Amino acid sequence: MKMVGYPTKKVKHENKGLYLGNKGMSFEDEINQSNEYYLVHDKAVIHKKPTPVTVVKTESFGKRRVRINEAYYVQPSTTDYNGIYRGKYIDFEAKQIASKVSFPFAFIHAHQVKHLKAIVAHGGIGFVLLRFSHYQETYLIDAKDLVEKYEDSNCKSLTYIWVKENGIFIPTGYRPLLDYLKAVDAMYFKGE
Amino acid sequence: MKMVGYPTKKVKHENKGLYLGNKGMSFEDEINQSNEYYLVHDKAVIHKKPTPVTVVKTESFGKRRVRINEAYYVQPSTTDYNGIYRGKYIDFEAKQIASKVSFPFAFIHAHQVKHLKAIVAHGGIGFVLLRFSHYQETYLIDAKDLVEKYEDSNCKSLTYIWVKENGIFIPTGYRPLLDYLKAVDAMYFKGE
C-alpha cells in the first residue's frame, strides 16, 4: 500500500490553504484553490483538466486496484482549464514566466492557440492568465488579442509593457487567492 | 525508446476509422471519433478529458524525456466530456451497460450527478449518453431527468423502458459514427 504515503493533489491544496496561506503555492495551486472557492460558493464550475498520460504497463494488486508501472506524459490537445460562468463557456490556459520583459510565444503550443481561436469562433470566452513571476503580477489576456499577436509573423512574444496596457490586472487576494473572474467580468460583461 | 511501439490513442482512432469502420471500436472510441468529426467540420469543440492519475515516481531519460514508473488512477471529479456547441456549454458522461433491463445508479458516481446538476443550474447543457450494449442502442438522457430519478430514494436505476420513453435515440451512422449532436438539437434547440 505505497499509495498511503502520497497524498493526492487535493489534500495538498487543502493543507496549504489552511496552514500556509499562499506561501509556497504554485500558480496552478492558486488557480485550483480559486476554482474550488468558486465551486463551493456556486459562482462558477471551472476545473483543471488532468494532465494526459499514455499508459503502457499496468499491474493489478489488492482488491481491484491497478498500479501503473510505465507511462509517459503526452502533449495536451487543448488548454488546461474550462467550465461555465454566468451561463457562458469559459476556456483558458495559465502560464508563468520568469522573464522581466516578455512572454515568448515559444511557451505556448500552436494547437492551444488554435483551440482558443475555435472557442471564440463558437461563441465562448477564451483567455490566457499570464503570471510574471519576477513582478508577482498576473494578467488576463483576451484570446482574440493573443491570436492576433500570435498570427503576426513579426511578433514573437507579448512584451510586459503590452500586457500591462492590454491585459486586465488580477490582484492577489485572500479568498479566493486569485479572483480572476473579476477580470472576466471587466473584460466580457462590461455594463451588465 | 519503448514508446515507439505504443501508438497514442489518437493514431489508433484514425487507423480504425479508416480501415475498420466501427468494428471493434469501443463506445468511447465512437464518441471521440465523432468529436473529431465535429471539430474538423467546425460544428462544435468537444473533447474527452484525460483520465486522471496520481504520479508517484518518475525517472528522466534521453533528452528531456520523463518516464512515469509508478502511478495510480484516481476518481475523476467531473464528467468525461465537455465543450461548446451552438454557443452553449455542453457537459456529459458516457456509460455502457450490459444489462437488458436497466442502468443501475451504482454505475454513476454521486459527484458526477452533482456536477451535472451544477452545470444545469449555471445554464449549461448536461446529459448522459447511455449505450445498452445488448441492443446496440444509444440514448441521450437529459441531466435534469437523471438528477430527478437519482434523487428519488425509491429509484435505484433507469429502466430500459423508461430510457426508451424519455431519452432520445441516437442512430449509429457513418460520419460521424455517433451523431449525438442531432439528439442535442432535438432535446435543447427545438424549433430553433
Image (cartoon, coloured by chain):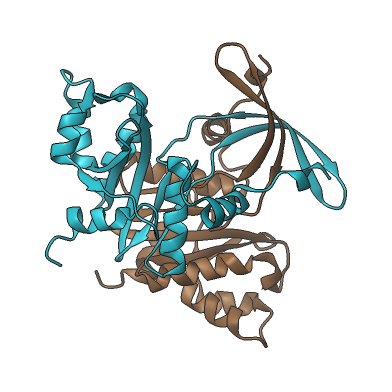
Chain colours: A cyan, B brown
| Residue nearer the viewer, B135 or A74 | A74
- Residue at position x 51%, y 73% in the image: B167
Q: Is the C terminus of chain B in the top left, top right, bottom left or bottom right quadrant?
A: bottom left
Vertical side of B133 occupied by A106: above or below: above
Q: Residue at x 23, y 46 (%)?
A: A169
Q: How far from the left and from the top, in percent, is residue A97? A: 35, 29
- To which quarter of the image does residue A72 belong? top right
Query: Residue A154: horizontal and vertical position, in percent?
Result: 15, 18
The quadrant where residue B42 appears: top left
Residue at the extreme top: B62
Residue A54: percent from left, percent from top = 62, 32
Residue that appears at 54% across and 70% down: B114
Question: Residue B56 vs residue A16: left or right?
Answer: right
Q: Residue furthest bottom?
A: B154
User: Quadrant of the image for the N terminus of chain B?
Assistant: top right
Question: Horizontal and vertical percent for residue B117?
Answer: 48, 72
Question: Image point 49% across, 53% down: which residue?
Answer: B81
- Drawn side of residue A95 relative to residue B111, left or right: left
Would you say A117 lies left or right of B131 here? left
Observer-nearest of B95 and B88: B88
The answer to whether A60 is drawn above or below residue B14 in the figure is below
Kindly tell me whether residue B179 is visible in this rendering: no
Q: Is residue B134 above or below residue A82?
A: below
